[in-house]
Amino acid sequence: MPQDQEEHSLNQLPQVYDSSLKEWIFQQAPAILPLLLPGASYEQTLTVEQIRPTVRMDKVFRMMYHKEEHILHLEFETGYDRQLRSRLLVYNAGLYRDHHLPVITIVIYPFRVTTAVPPLCIKSGEDEILTFQFKTLPLFELDAEDFVRQHHTAMYPLLPTMNNVHTELIAQAMQELAELYCDDEVTLAQQFIWMRLLLERTDIVPDLEKEQIKERLDMFDELWEKSPTIQKMREQ
């Protein structure tokens, strides 16, 4: 299959972006959480197997935040969902019931879409019954250069979703990742796979820069072929 057709078929797989983002944060949660929520300190990844399938959430962590234990719920959204705010409320209430700890909810948007606006206010006439606060993190409003300048390598796979992405910046990020994972080609390939998948979908990177970045990533085709994730996608 020609490479461009293969890339297109991969991007048509259901929930491929959602699954990639979940796996990305699962692998490096201790490094990523403080970047998403300054002041947070990772303690434990919580299973969602106990959550009923109809209300299954993306990723949940136990953390220290301002010297107190909290639950952090991260939800990845690649499109607009008019029911999102009420769904987040259900998740938040369920986590509080199960853990009896404050629950902070953050919605992460990798692509430019209409975002949910907090808070969710439920009223009866003029009487306020409930106000639910949550946070949003549109990655497309972040500056990719800031993360590379500070060498936050855990965030590098998400660089194509951010502002100020250019070929030289991605080349520097790829070099740093290659040095970091010089003894682990599979993990290195995984980083580039996530980068490539997000690059295909994002509309924030100019077309010329996107093509040049793809050429850089093409240099790692052998690592791409070794990735268990890509093999699993092909099997599906």
Image: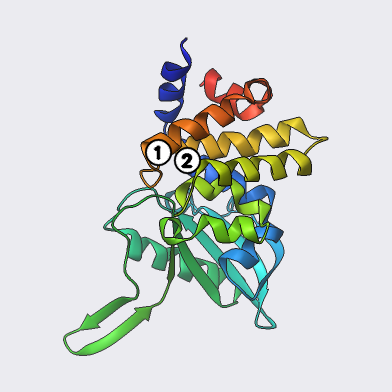
Helix, strand or loop at mark 1: helix
Frontmost residue, 46 versus 34: 34
Q: Amino acid at mark 1?
A: Arg
Q: Residue furthest front?
A: 168
Looking at the image, is 184 positioned above or below residue 158?
above
Residue 15 visible here: no
Q: Secondary structure at mark 2?
A: helix
Seen from the viewer's position, the closer of residues 53 and 22 is: 22
Query: Dot 1, how many residues are within 10 Å of its Cα: few (below 14), some (14-19), or many (20+)?
Result: some
Q: Residue at x 41, y 44 (%)?
A: 205
- Compute the Cα span from label 1 to label 2: 5 Å
* Position of residue 129 measured from the top left corner of the image (x, y, whole percent): 30, 84
Residue at the bottom extreme, as displayed: 127
> Quick check: 1 above or below 151?
above
- Drawn side of residue 178 relative to residue 6, left or right: right
**Where residue 155 sits in the image (x, y, percent)?**
60, 53
Q: Is residue 105 above or below residue 19?
A: below
Three-letter code for the amino acid on which mark 2 is drawn: Leu
Q: Are marks 1 and 2 in contact (CB under 8 Å)?
A: yes
Q: Position of residue 201 (x, y in %)?
A: 40, 38
Label 2 neighbour load within 10 Å: few <14, some 14-19, many 20+: many
Q: Nearer the viewer, residue 207 or 180?
A: 207
- Which residue is identified by label 2? 198
x and y percent of residue 146 in the render? Answer: 57, 61
Q: Can residue 223 be seen?
A: yes
Report whether 196 appears left or right of 150.
Answer: left
Instruction: Name the outermost residue toward the left.
Output: 125
Q: Quadrant of residue 46?
A: bottom right
In the picture, the disc for residue 201 is 1
* Image disc number at residue 44: none
Residue 66 appears in which quarter of the rendering? bottom right
Question: For this view, does 100 lie left or right of residue 120?
Answer: right
